[in-house]
Image (cartoon, rainbow, N blue to C red):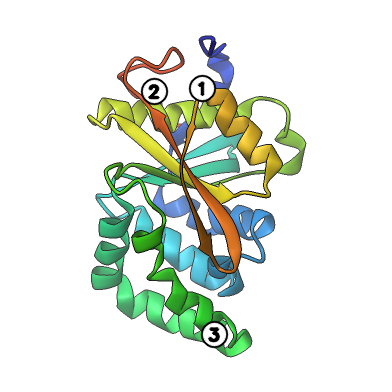
Amino acid sequence: MIKPFPVDEGVMQSIRPMQFRDARRVAELHHAAMGTSLWSMLGLRFLQTLYQALVDSPYFIGFVYVEDGRVRGFIAGSLDTSKMYQDIGRRRFMFLGPTAALGLLRHPGVSLKLIETYRYFGVSGADDVPGESLFCSFEPDLRGKRVSGHINKVLFDELLARGHRAVKITTEVSNEGANRQLQSWGFGDAHRFRFYGKDMVTYVLELAGHPRLEARSRHPAV
C-alpha cells in the first residue's frame, strides 16, 4: 500500500519553476549525472542552449531545487514530448543546430544515436500517455535526503493540475535504483523495448486519486 508523502515544507519552499537564467547550471547538473547520454555527449554548450529552448516551449515543465541562491537539482518533464521537440526544433533550430554540430565534430559517432532518437516515439510505448518525466539530477550530497521525492511530487502535482491522468518515465531495465524508486511510487511496467542497444522499460503512474498527489501545483518563486 502506498502511503501519503511526508512533505517537508522547507524543501517545498526551495523548489520553483525552471527559468531561462537556470539553463547553464541545469546543463552542468545534467552533464554530471548523464555524461554518456546522447544530449550530454553533444557538450555543455548544446545542453545549455537546449534548456534555454525548452523553458520557452509551452509543452515543457521544469523545476529547480535552490539553496542559498544556488540551483542544486532539477527535474525536466513535458506535457507532450513529441510536440515539445517539434516545437523547439522548429523555433530554435538556428541556435540548437550549430551547437549540436560542434558536439558532433568532437564525437562523430553520436550521429548514429541522433538518427536513432527519432525511433523513440515509435517504440517507447504508452502512446496514450503524453505527460512524461524526462530528466532529473541533484548534487551528490543531496542523495538520500528525499529532495528528489519532493521535486517529483511537484512535477506530478503540476501534471495532475493541468488535467493529465497519468505520467510516464522511461529508464534502463538494468537501473535497479531507478526501478525500485519508481515501483515505490506505484509506477507500473507498461512496455519494454530496445533502444541505443539497451533494454528499456516504460513505466506509467496513474495520477488521479494517488495518495501522494494533489490536483494543484506548489512552486513559489525563490
- Secondary structure of the residue carrying tag 2 is loop
Inspect the image, locate mark 3, and give the three-letter code of the amino acid beneath it. Answer: Leu
Give left or right: position of 101 versus 28.
left
User: Which quadrant is the N terminus positioned in?
Assistant: top right
State the separation of the CA atoms marked 3 and 1.
39 Å
Q: Nearer the viewer, mark 2 or mark 3?
A: 3
Q: Which percent across, then down, holds residue 16?
A: 44, 33
Residue at x 35% of width, y 60% of height: 121
Residue at x 53% of width, y 62% of height: 194
First in sequence: mark 1 or mark 2?
A: 1
Q: Which residue is mark 3?
A: 104
Please tell me how crowded label 1 is: few (under 14), some (14-19), or many (20+) other residues with Cα within 10 Å. some
Residue at x 58% of width, y 68% of height: 44
Residue at x 62% of width, y 49% of height: 173
Q: Which percent across, then down, holds residue 140?
A: 75, 42
Please tell me how crowded label 3 is: few (under 14), some (14-19), or many (20+) other residues with Cα within 10 Å. some
Give the camera-side residue of 174 and 141: 174
Q: Residue furthest right?
A: 141
Q: Which residue is mark 1?
A: 12
First in sequence: mark 3 or mark 1?
A: 1
State the separation of the CA atoms marked 1 and 2.
7 Å
Classify 165 as above or below 1: below
- Secondary structure of the residue carrying tag 1 is helix
Q: Are marks 1 and 2 in contact (CB under 8 Å)?
A: yes
State the separation of the CA atoms marked 2 and 3.
39 Å
Q: Nearer the viewer, mark 3 or mark 1?
A: 3
Give left or right: position of 79 versus 47.
left
Inspect the image, locate mark 2, and give the three-letter code of the amino acid beneath it. Answer: Arg
Give the camera-side residue of 197 and 167: 197
Q: Which residue is mark 2?
A: 218
